[in-house]
Image: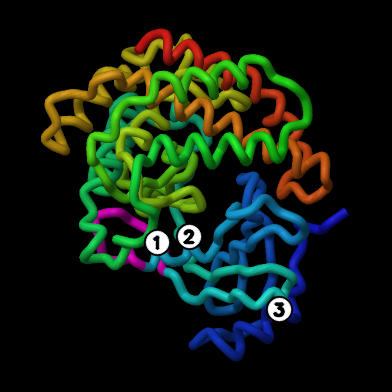
């Protein structure tokens, strides 16, 4: 079994000593429990802490786990209205620890695993979600030319391209037949809207647990996990938020299904979408259900890959991966329902 749980600290320390200004060992490493894709470690040194994020070792799906792209986009966003950690270095020499990795600052703050924000007051819940909305609009308003990301994604119809990519990824990691997933892929292809020309930076997995908020207020201070980022259609990111909220509440689904949002101070789907449209000067969004269905499809394909890595023995968190894998049929069914709602 390939080890994704530990690091060769001697190799990491020697590399950082030679390549990172101001670095002084020794190092202690602690693996973050969250995340299913790229193993991530907190590096503790006597003077300061860093975060190391690596590509998993072993055989991987083509184009997956692109830590070089994560590094590039976050470095480009430094100083923008989209908060990110400070990037220090990228190592693409697999000989150092067995796979590529990058080093960034540790961002100290609060991370919320579930959108119910149980530990916050009613007012603070609404404020956190409002700042989540602000950052999302800011992300889609980034001038990709001025920050050097104009070539960060290929031209053409983003949704069509993504459906093609993730259909191939899904088939490559398929472990059993899931009829709902087959129907969803067919329906997405048949109902695909025409390309409207919108082309922005997109995160690809924008949700509350991929953000760090200030420990003292409700401001977002870093957006994490940029593996799926590219140049694409902004509505896919917005739909990603709504997709998560339509899942069951609790530790497994981490959604808002059945939750009395008004009582908790949380916005409805419609209110969140309207706030986003106001921030970006949009009159509204036609056929938004299609983008939600697309997001359910893509997430189903992603977690199918997580399940396959667990079965192959190179998942970042094997126990969690097996639990997550059980959601593939549920995501596919929800995607079909989103398409029906339109």
Q: In the drawing, does residue 191 fall left or right of residue 194? A: right
| Crowd rating for badge 3 (residues with CA inside 10 Å; few <14, some 14–19, many 20+) | some
Q: Residue furthest right?
A: 1
Q: Earlier in the sequence, mark 2 or mark 3?
A: 2
Q: Position of residue 273 (x, y in %)?
A: 26, 25
Q: Quadrant of residue 185?
A: top right
Q: In the drawing, does residue 176 fall left or right of residue 110? A: right
Q: Contact (CB < 8 A) between labels 1 and 2?
A: yes
Residue visible at 42% across and 36% down? 160
Q: Which mark is residue 151?
A: none
Q: Earlier in the sequence, mark 1 or mark 3?
A: 1
Q: CA distance from mark 1 to mark 2?
A: 6 Å
Magenta span: helix, strand or loop, mainly? loop
Q: Secondary structure at mark 3?
A: loop
Is residue 302 highlighted in magenta? no
Task: Determine which residue is flagged by label 3.
Answer: 96
What is the span of residues highlighted in magenta in the rendered image? Answer: 76-86
Name above or below for residue 40 compared with residue 252: below
| Crowd rating for badge 2 (residues with CA inside 10 Å; few <14, some 14–19, many 20+) | many
Q: Nearest the camera: 17 or 76? A: 76
């Amino acid at each position: 079994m390939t080890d994704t749980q530990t690091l060769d600290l001697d190799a990491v320390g020697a590399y950082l000593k030679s390549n990172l200004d101001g670095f002084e060992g020794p190092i202690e490493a602690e693996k973050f429990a969250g995340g299913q894709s790229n193993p991530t470690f907190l590096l503790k040194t006597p003077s300061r802490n860093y975060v190391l994020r690596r590509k998993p070792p072993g055989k991987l799906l083509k184009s997956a786990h692109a830590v070089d792209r994560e590094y590039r986009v976050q470095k480009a966003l430094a100083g923008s209205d989209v908060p990110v950690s400070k990037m220090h270095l990228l190592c693409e020499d697999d000989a150092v620890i067995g796979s590529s990795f990058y080093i960034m600052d540790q961002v100290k703050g609060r991370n919320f695993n579930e959108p119910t924000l149980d530990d916050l007051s009613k007012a603070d819940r609404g404020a956190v979600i409002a700042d989540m909305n602000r950052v999302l609009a800011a992300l889609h308003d980034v001038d990709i030319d001025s920050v050097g990301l104009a070539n960060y994604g290929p031209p053409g119809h983003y949704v069509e391209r993504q459906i093609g990519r993730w259909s191939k990824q899904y088939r490559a990691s398929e472990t059993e037949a899931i009829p709902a997933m087959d129907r969803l892929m067919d329906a997405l292809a048949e109902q695909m809207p025409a390309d409207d020309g919108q082309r922005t930076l997109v995160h690809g997995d924008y949700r509350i647990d991929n953000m760090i908020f200030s420990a003292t207020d409700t401001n977002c201070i870093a957006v994490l996990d940029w593996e799926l980022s590219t140049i694409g259609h902004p509505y896919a990111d917005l739909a990603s938020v709504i997709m998560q909220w339509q899942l069951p509440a609790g530790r497994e689904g981490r959604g808002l299904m059945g939750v009395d949002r008004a009582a908790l101070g949380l916005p409805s789907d419609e209110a969140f979408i309207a706030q986003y449209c106001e921030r970006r000067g949009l009159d509204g969004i036609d056929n938004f259900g299609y983008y939600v269905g697309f997001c359910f499809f893509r997430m189903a394909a992603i977690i199918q890959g997580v399940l396959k890595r667990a079965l192959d023995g190179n998942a970042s968190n094997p126990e969690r991966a097996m639990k997550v894998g059980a959601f593939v049929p549920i995501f596919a069914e929800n995607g079909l329902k989103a398409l029906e709602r339109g």
